């Protein structure tokens, strides 16, 4: 059996870490199983869906390396949803209701006062043809609810194990609004049937939904996918991310200079039994994936961890892979430069700072007590700087000035780079050249 899963974003915003994790888990599972991934664009809400968001989602997925085998838009499939609605109506499973939003609200308030669960009272099922005709003559249009069985629905969740949702505790879900538009539930089930989806992998906020949807599946066909509900993402403080998702969009993270592999490494590993660390490729992530590694606890998303992983990935990234990015930042120096500084960047953009340090005119930073020492160091720096120059030079200075350790090399590092930390000085000196180094050691701008 070929595994077929789908990622089903609504094009009403850009992708954020929450829905990217869902996309990624779908992708990892499908690729690991040599199956197929369908990108379903849930655009039945024609008012809020836009082509720009749809394109943005596709661009973000492509940037992340999450490819798909087929894609379609729900807005192109209304005839299928109409046909399914017709079937359900004929079977008495989809019934018209005429309550206004205000009336439903009042009902719920009353139920709350009476300490009853806020479940729709099914008054519309009692309406006669004459009642309905009278309501429609008043100008009311029906919305349509699916009649749940009132029995418990049980399934074996791939992540959560046996799950039971008691449909007696749910309101019959509205499938069609009064303006005739479809809510999410019916189109999703119809498409999952038509596309022969074998696995529905989504966040655990859909567990209750699944209880109701399974009854819709059963009413429409013999096809029932397996369900895998993943624990939700929380921040490092354990709180939900919903308020911060805007700043955690792919667009934002990409602009901040985060690497797609860092985002995928983190999102693939949080909430699993694997260590959270930088992984070299999507192929490796795929090979390491298993639902059995995903726990029930919420997955903690920590931006600091993301930065750390980003740095780790860059420390191993060959020049060829960052060349375009460096070019776009106008950072020269080529491969030799990248190889020297890559261990000291968290983001590619940090290379710009090191480029300034090494190549742009900059004054040396020299403490008053080091002025003479730095001048002497400038005087004995050879013209031709090789891989051995730094250690030989330091060796001479050590003897001549009776300095050692930090007091020996820190004044040189500061004078040459203006910073207290950074890549090894030997290679920096080679990139910088003797002339610039001498000038900075003398406190000049060079
Ligand atoms: N468009 C739905 C959502 O983003 C899809 C949920 C599902 O995977 O069924 O929540």
Image: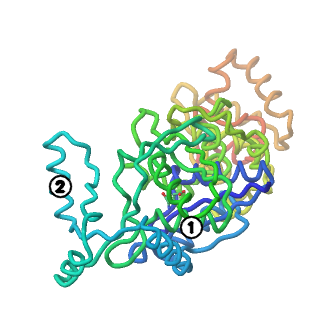
Query: Dot 2: what SS?
Result: helix
Q: Residue at x 76, y 26 (%)?
A: 394
Q: Which mark is first along the chain, 2 or 1?
A: 2
Instruction: Please indicate whether residue 37 sits to the left or right of residue 178 in the image.
Output: right
Closest to the observer, 357 or 199: 199
> Where 348 sits versus 441, above or below?
below
Q: Quadrant of residue 273?
A: top right
Residue 441 visible within the image? no
Residue 430 visible within the image:
yes
In the image shown, does 160 or 94 lie closer to the viewer?
A: 94
Q: In this view, does 253 lie above or below 96?
A: above
Image position of 394 (left or right of 222) = right
Q: Which residue is at a point 60% across and 63% down the rendered structure image?
A: 221
Q: Mark 1 and 2 residues: CB-CB less than 8 Å, in contact? A: no
Q: What element carries label 1?
A: helix
Which x, y percent locates residue 60?
A: 60, 63
Q: Distance between the residues labelled 1 and 2?
A: 31 Å
CB of residue at label 2: within 8 Å of ligand 1? no
Residue 419 in percent (x, y) is at 58, 37
Q: Is residue 228 above or below residue 160?
A: below
Q: Which residue corresponds to mark 2?
A: 107
Residue position for label 1: 190
Question: In the rendered image, which quarter is residue 310 located in?
Answer: top right
Residue 17 position in % (x across, y down) = 53, 50
Assess disc 2: are there few (<14), some (14-19) or many (≥20) residues with their C-alpha within 10 Å of its C-alpha.
some
Classify the position of the N terminus by image quarter. Answer: bottom right
So how many labels did they put on this image? 2
- 203 or 191, which is in the foreground? 191
| Left or right: residue 431 compared with residue 92 | right
């Amino acid at each position: 059996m070929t595994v077929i899963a789908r990622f089903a974003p609504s094009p009403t915003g850009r992708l954020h870490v929450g829905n990217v994790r869902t996309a990624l888990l779908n992708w990892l599972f499908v690729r690991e199983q040599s199956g197929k991934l369908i990108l379903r664009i849930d655009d039945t809400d024609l008012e809020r869906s836009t082509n720009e968001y749809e394109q943005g989602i596709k661009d973000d997925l492509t940037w992340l390396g999450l490819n798909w085998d087929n894609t379609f838009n729900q807005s192109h499939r209304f005839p299928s949803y109409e046909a399914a609605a017709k079937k359900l109506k004929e079977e008495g499973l989809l019934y018209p209701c005429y309550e206004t939003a205000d009336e439903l609200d009042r009902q719920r308030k009353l139920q709350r006062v009476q300490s009853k669960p806020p479940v729709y009272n099914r008054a519309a099922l009692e309406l006669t043809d004459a009642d309905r005709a009278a309501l429609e003559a008043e100008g009311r249009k029906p919305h349509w609810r699916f009649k749940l069985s009132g029995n418990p629905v049980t399934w074996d969740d791939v992540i959560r194990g046996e799950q039971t949702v008691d449909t007696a505790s749910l309101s019959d879900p509205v499938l069609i609004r009064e303006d005739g538009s479809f809510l999410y539930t019916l189109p999703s089930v119809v498409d999952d049937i038509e596309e022969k989806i074998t696995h529905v992998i989504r966040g655990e906020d859909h567990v209750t939904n699944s209880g109701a949807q399974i009854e819709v599946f059963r009413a429409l066909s013999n096809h029932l996918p397996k369900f895998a509900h993943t624990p939700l993402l929380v921040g490092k403080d354990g709180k939900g991310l919903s308020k911060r998702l805007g700043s955690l969009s792919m667009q934002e993270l990409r602009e901040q200079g985060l690497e797609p592999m860092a985002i995928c490494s983190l999102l693939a590993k949080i909430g699993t039994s694997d260590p959270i660390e930088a992984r070299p490729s999507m192929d490796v992530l795929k090979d390491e994936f298993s639902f059995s590694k995903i726990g029930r606890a919420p997955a903690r998303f920590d931006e600091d961890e993301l930065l750390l992983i980003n740095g780790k990935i860059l420390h191993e990234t060959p020049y060829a892979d960052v060349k375009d990015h460096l070019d776009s930042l106008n950072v020269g120096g080529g491969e030799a430069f990248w190889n020297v500084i890559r261990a000291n960047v968290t983001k590619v953009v940090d290379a710009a700072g090191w480029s300034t340090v090494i190549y742009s005119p900059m004054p040396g930073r020299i403490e008053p007590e080091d002025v003479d020492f730095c001048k002497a160091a400038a005087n004995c720096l050879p013209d031709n700087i090789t891989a051995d120059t730094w250690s030989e030079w330091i060796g001479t200075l050590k003897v001549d000035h009776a300095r050692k350790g930090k007091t020996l090399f820190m004044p040189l590092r500061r004078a040459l780079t203006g910073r207290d930390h950074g890549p090894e000085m030997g290679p920096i000196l080679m990139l910088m050249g003797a002339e610039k180094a001498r000038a900075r050691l003398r406190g000049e701008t060079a």
